[in-house]
Image (tube, helix red, strand yellow):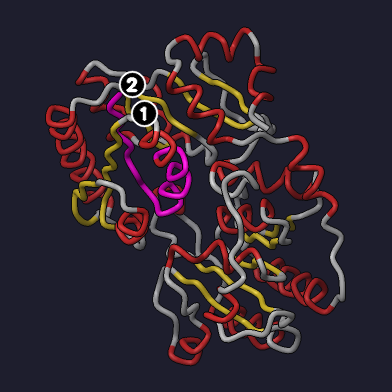
Amino acid sequence: MNILIDIGHPAHVHLFRCFAHEMLTRGHKVLFTCRDKEFEIALLKAEGFEYISFGKKYSSKLGKILGLLKFDCLEWKTCLQFKPDILLSHGSMYAAHAAWLYGRPHISFEDTYNFEQIRLYEPFTAAILTADYEHPFISKKEIHYAGYHELAYLHPKRFTPDKSVLTELGLMEDEKYVLLRFVSWKATHDSGHKGMSIENKRRAVRLFSQYAKVFISSEKDLPEDLQCYRLPTPPERIHHVMAFSSLIFGESATMVSEGVVLGVPGIYMDNTGRYYTREQEVRYGMCFNFSESLEDQDRAINKGVEILSSSTFDNSGHEQMLKEKIDVTGFLVDFIENWPISKQRAKDNPDYQYRFK
C-alpha cells in the first residue's frame, strides 16, 4: 500500500510518525508532503522519513488563496508520481482535493473544529476521525475514537522518556523546571488572537524563576532580554523535555495537551479554547484554561505560581485518562490496513477500538 501523508503543522509530524514507522515495518510505502513551516522539515529529517516540501507558506489573505491553488496542484502532481492508495492528514484541504482528483480516499483527523477549514476539505474526504469528547462537529463521515492526537505518539506503548535530556538542559535530576510556549498567531484559525502581552511574558518568567528553572519555546522571535531562556534542545527532543517538567504554560493547546498525556499539569490561554483541553480540565483535573484577557493572563500566571510553589501536584487524573483512552496509533494502523471495511465496522461496533489499549 502506498500512503501519502500531508503535514500542515509540526505537531502533525508527531501525530503520524509512529503510524508511519509501523506501516514501513509492515512493508508499506509512506511519503510525506509539507510546507516549510517552523520545524516540520527538521522533524521529518530526524525521523528519516521520505518527504517533499512545497516551499514556504503564505501569511497574507491573498497569499493564502494563491497558496491553496499552488499547493493543490503540487499535491495532485505528487499523487500522479507516487500513486497513493490512500491519503492522510489533519484537516488538509490540499490532500483532500488531490485525493478527490486522483480518485483515492482521504482520511482526516480533526480536533480544532475550525469550520472555515472543515468546509474546504469535508466534501472531498472519505472519513473524519474525531475524539469522543464533546465537540460541535457532526457529520456522516465522522468516526469517533477514545483518545487525543497526543496519544498517537505519547501513549506509554509508543514513548519512553529519556532522562539524559536533563543533562542536555544543564539540570540536576531533582531540579524543578517549567516550559513556556508562545505561538506566532499566523494560522488561519488564529485570526483576531493576540496572545500574552510581552509585559506578562516577562512577569511570568520573573515569578516562575523563583520556584523553577524557566525555558521558553517560541514560534516568533523573543525580545533580547528573554533570549537567554530559549530552550536549547533540538525540536525532536521536546517531548523528553516536557516529560520531566513541572508545568507546561502558554498559548499552545497541543503542547499543553502533550504535557497532560505525559502526566504534567498544563495552563492554556486562548479566547476560543479547545474542546480537548476543557475535558482535560473538567474530567481529569490536569489542565487549566484561561482566556487571553489581561485579567485572565494574571490569573493564569498566579495559577502557575501556585503549582510551582507546591511540593506536590495531584495527577491521579492522568492514571484515569490512560485507563479510559486508547493507543491511537494502534487504532489507526488497523483502520487503514482494513479500509474500507474498518469504516463500517467502526460505526457498527464502536467498542472494537478498545482492543487498542
Question: What percent of the width, then of the height, locates residue 322?
Answer: 74, 42
Question: What percent of the width, then of the height, locates residue 18?
Answer: 47, 43
Question: What percent of the width, then of the height, locates residue 30?
Answer: 30, 36
The amino acid pointed to by label 1 is Tyr
The amino acid pointed to by label 2 is Phe
Query: On the rendered structure, is 286 left or right of 293?
Result: right
Q: Is residue 262 above or below residue 163?
A: above
Q: In which quadrant is the C terminus drawn?
A: top right
Q: Is residue 297 above or below residue 204?
A: above
Q: Which residue is mark 2?
A: 124
Q: Foreground: 108 or 167?
A: 167
Label 1 crowd bin: few (<14), some (14–19), many (20+), radius 10 Å:
many
Query: On the rendered structure, is 100 left or right of 162?
Result: left
What is the secondary structure assignment of the residue under circle 2? Answer: helix
Q: Foreground: 247 or 71?
A: 247
Query: On the rendered structure, is 70 left or right of 136?
Result: left
Q: In which quadrant is the N terminus drawn?
A: top left
- Residue 12 belongs to magenta span: yes
Q: Which residue is mark 1?
A: 121
Look at the image and give the residue range highlighted in magenta.
1-20
